[in-house]
Image (tube, rainbow, N blue to C red):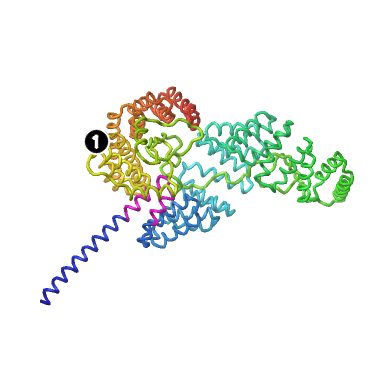
Amino acid sequence: MLNAILHISGRLASLLLLFMAAMAARAQINTDRVIDIGRNALYFEDYVLSIQYFNQVINVKPYLCEPYFYRGLAKLNLEDYRGAEEDCTRTIECNPFVVNAYNVRALARINLKDYDGAIEDYRAAMKYDPENVGVLHNISMCYLEEKKYEEADSLLNYLMKVSPGYNDAYILKSQVNLEMGDTAQAYAYADEAVKRDPYESAYWSVRAMIELMREEYSEAESDLTQAIRLGINNANNYINRALARYNLKDLRGAMADYDEALDLEPNNYIGLYNRGLLRAQVGDDNRAIEDFDKVIEMNPGNMMAIFNRALLRDNTGDYEGAVDDYGTVLERYPEFAYGYRRRADLYRKMGKTKLAAADEDKLFNLVLDEQFGKQNPNCSTVTRETRSESDEEDVDDYGKMVVADAGDLASYNSDYRGRVQNRNVEVRMQPLVAMTYYEQPSELINHSLYYHDIDVLNAGSGTSLKLIMTTRERPLTQKEADLHFSLINGRKLDAGQGRSCAEQRLRRALDFYLVQDFDSALDDLGEAVVCDATFFPVYFVRSLILCKKAEVEQSQRVTETASDRRESGVQTGVRDYDRALSDLDMVTGLAPDFAYAYYNRGCIKAMLKDFLGALDDFSKTIELDGSFAEAYYNRGLVNVFLGNNKQGIDDLSRAGELGIAASYNVIKRFRK
């Protein structure tokens, strides 16, 4: 009997061990899936949602390093630099061979002004990848911040040997030489960068800034005009060109540039201050006061702006306001002789002779002090035509135009912000149309994507969530994410077949899609097809999710070995795109007037280099919806790729008219 009991107990123990092993394996699979969903959210820049997923994994398995790293990456993009640093530190403690954790922690430390710590991290990363261009670039920038110019210069020489085609190294060398006071050598390096890549707007801007410092205004204006022609809208380029034009006595051109800069950045300090000076110079006193009002609102301690406003108020008859402003400046600068002179004159105009006499006495004493060799601390001994943005000490410079500080000609190289696959890619297709509930608003594009069957779906939904078609998807807020998690858990699905069954599964699939769980969404859509094979929105949404899934998988192949990519990655991506095209073929068969299926199919074909097929699909889209800006834009790009430049530029021009501002930059590039 005892042997039998022991035998049974042994079997039970074995079964229990097998059960526990199965549960552990299941937990591991679930953990991996949650990490994958979190990576989906991270890739599509839904950082808050991604952190929630990584938190779930950390709570269950705090010994895993992967979720700490991805959570740190999400925090970096949310500008929680301290949190990013802590998560990367935890990752490195768990596994010191996660090279990217050093890179991300270095970026966090740079933003925390811990440049020595960032250098230490980058040096650690270089043990595994000693010729990483981005790392070498950033270490050089850190040395610049620490004013270690010889170290920066030496490292940049090494970078140029490692990567002779890396033109940003010349801009960094230019900045090193500027910091060391050698403008001639700084110009030589900036000039070399322009010669190496004459289509990079930033290089022209850097060379122009050095020309402004050398008072070579004609050359600076020419270079800035080229920078503006090649680049995206950049307020600083207009402001610097305005300064060049001002010194060339082209006041009308300078004013136009300041207006353009302030249209782009209404609160740009240099633009407002300089335009205020220029308006005062041409007698437009009231509007000059408006500019200085804005400067003072942004920086109430800006004595230069307050004194200029005092002069303008004096001119326009606002004597009380002028007295207040003069008083503010003189309280800060009690040795400012010209301030007493102006206020004394104003007091006499107001009939306040005693106050005027007091200011005149103070002025007389200051003049005597100057004659007997006492240096006025508020007067500069250097004559300059302009002043730097950071120079607020010499109040006598109140009437001089402001030049941006010469520092920071280059910026840090960060391949960890936003979508890695879009780095250094300036010309790309507009996004796919998505069926969703949420849209990023646009100030320029007013056209709403409409299809009558979507209205019918919304009318019968019995919910406040309304389906829309958009190319401008946006991440969920915390409240919206919580809503869709609750809907996933709370939806009751009908059994059987029919349209109602398909609609319910479509709605839950959209919930899964919005919280970045693509696999669960695809499972529901597969069941929806079984419920009703003629319900076209199911195929449309499934094609969209297949494309998003393929995009994420392709981005993850960057870290795989070549053999891994041959075995799975490329095949998986192509297979998903083929399935998406098949689904869109079903949509166009079931709903031949649904423009956005042709548009998405055109986008996928263009991605797969089938440009002729894409051209046909974009043309059909425009035939069905003649105000769809994105279709014109994408057809324009395809035409240019096919060599049809005139048709391409015509389409891009139409896209610009309809609100896609990037069209004009692309037109400039292709015309060049």
The answer to whether residue 133 shows anywhere in this view is no
Looking at the figure, which quarter contains the N terminus? bottom left
Q: Give x and y (percent) for residue 341.
A: 84, 43
Q: Is residue 37 magenta?
A: yes
Using residue 219 as the reference point, say whether residue 101 is left or right of it: left
The total number of labels drawn is 1
Q: Residue 192's image quarter?
A: top right
Q: Is residue 16 left or right of residue 98?
A: left
Instruction: Give amino acid for label 1.
Output: Ala
* Residue at which label 1 appears: 533
Position of 308 compared to 73: left or right? right
Category of crowding for the residue at label 1, using alpha-carbon neighbours closer than 10 angstroms: few (below 14), some (14–19), many (at least 20): some
Residue stretch rendered in magenta on the structure: 31-55
SS at mark 1?
loop
Q: Position of residue 440 (x, y in %)?
A: 46, 39
Q: Main secondary structure of the magenta part?
A: helix
